[in-house]
Image (cartoon, helix red, strand yellow):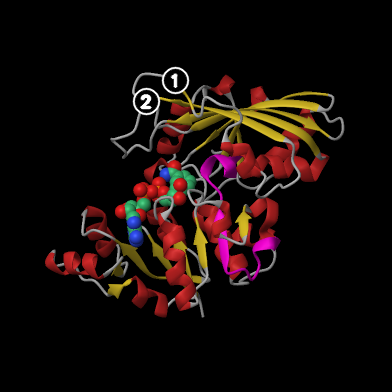
Amino acid sequence: MPARIGVVGFGTIGKRVAEAITRQPDMELVGIVKTKPDYTAELAVKLGYKLYAANQDSLRKFEEAGLPVKGVLEDLLENVDLVVDATPGGVGAKNKTIYEQKGVPAIFQGGEKADVAEVSFNSLCNYEEAIGRRYVRVVSCNTTGLLRILCTLNKAYGLKRVYATIVRRAADPKEIKRGPVNAIKPDPATMPSHHGEDVKTVLRDLDIVTAAVVVPTTLMHVHVVYAKLARQVSNDEVIELLANTPRIVLVEANKGVTSTADIVELARDLGRKRYDIPELIVWRESIVVKGDEMYWMQAVHQESIVVPENIDAIRAMLKLTTNAMDSIALTDKTLGVKRGTLI
Ligand code: NAD
């Protein structure tokens, strides 16, 4: 019998995770929880998702709007093996009390503090640590992008030290209230940024420092990274390693992929839904290895990169498979996530 999963919060991350669950042969989407009967609630109904209200207050709003609603969050929790909480940062921690009362395991997102869960998670780093756990946090989009490549390099060569500058998108495309509109904003102006600390919730012993700025774009984050490796390697070795790692693809500026706009255009040309790019994108030309030192630039699609990790976290927690690579392979096949190249 497929595992019965609920999704709480149907925004940028929640709607993608919900759809990804419907594509898994070993999972069933029991329902989604929303606060308001807005257009996304109508969309969920059209997609055949069962709708639950966040509380009695919102239940009344759904009923007044004439939308078919199955009950409230607590009713959904009676019928699921696990929930994925994709509510805004801080709400998940509040919801955790309800999950605990109902005895339902839960996945939280990167907007929650690390202590909301027993384990902070990335599939390529620590799948095994999430096996059988009740509360797991899938780290943020930037941390997921960093961890995919850092764990890969660490396993292959060992990592001594990492420094990364994170150039953050100002907002997701649908967000109208965030800036900057015409500025570059240190985020924060003090050093380091929290991203390195977040990486260390998974790669605990890594010596990593990050700094971040926010720029006026909605099209992906870019990271400029320096790493000192534990041994000498060659450029070719690193490129071979990355080209054969799940969820990492190489793009070439020489072939016209010169910016995040080009990456997004390519995803659109490939007919990807919502132009989602769950792969970590690394510019091939940016990879420079000198002995035991390495530099590169990479791009992260904030809206979709954490979706495959949420699916793997479900499999690990419910022990649908205890083998990380089996879960990654199934997730990537069902979601069309590439390795090596986007085309
Ligand atoms: P979002 O605002 O797009 O979606 C959150 C949704 O939850 C909204 O629809 C909101 O109405 C709903 N909601 C609020 N309170 C609720 C409640 N009590 N019950 C049910 N639904 C409720 O936010 P998002 O961007 O999807 O972010 C969700 C989480 O994922 C956050 O922790 C965030 O930090 C993390 N995250 C976001 C991104 C990103 O770039 N958008 C990337 C990675 C991780």
Residue 154 highlighted magenta (yes or no):
no
Nearer to the camera, 246 or 319:
319
Secondary element under disc 2, as helix, strand or loop, is loop
| Residue 83 in the image: above or below residue 152 | below
Q: Which residue is mark 2?
A: 180
Q: Is residue 194 rendered to the left or right of residue 37?
A: right
Q: Position of residue 269 (x, y in %)?
A: 41, 36
From this view, report whether residue 161 is shown above or below residue 135.
above
For the residue pair 89 and 171, the one nearer the viewer reads as 89
Query: Which residue shows up at 27% across the image and 75% down it?
Result: 70
Q: Are marks 1 and 2 in contact (CB under 8 Å)?
A: yes
Viewed as shown, does residue 79 lie left or right of 138?
left
Q: Quadrant of residue 62?
A: bottom left
Q: Is residue 203 left or right of residue 47?
A: right
* Residue drawn at point x = 28 percent, y = 68 percent: 55
Callout 2 amino acid: Pro
Please give left or right for residue 271 compared with residue 336 in the image.
left
Q: Is residue 5 visible?
A: no
Check the image and report above or below for 279 versus 29: above
Residue 27 picture location, percent across and down: 49, 70
Determine whether the residue tagged by mark 1 lies in a helix, strand or loop. loop
Residues rendered magenta in the picture: 128-145
Q: Amino acid at mark 1?
A: Ile
Residue 230 placement (x, y as % from top left): 85, 35
Q: Residue furthest front?
A: 190
Asked whether 331 or 312 is in front, the reply is 312
**Outermost residue to the right:** 231
Mark-to-mark CA distance, 1 and 2? 7 Å
Q: Residue at x 58, y 39 (%)?
A: 280
Q: Which mark is residue 184?
A: 1
* Mark seen at residue 262: none
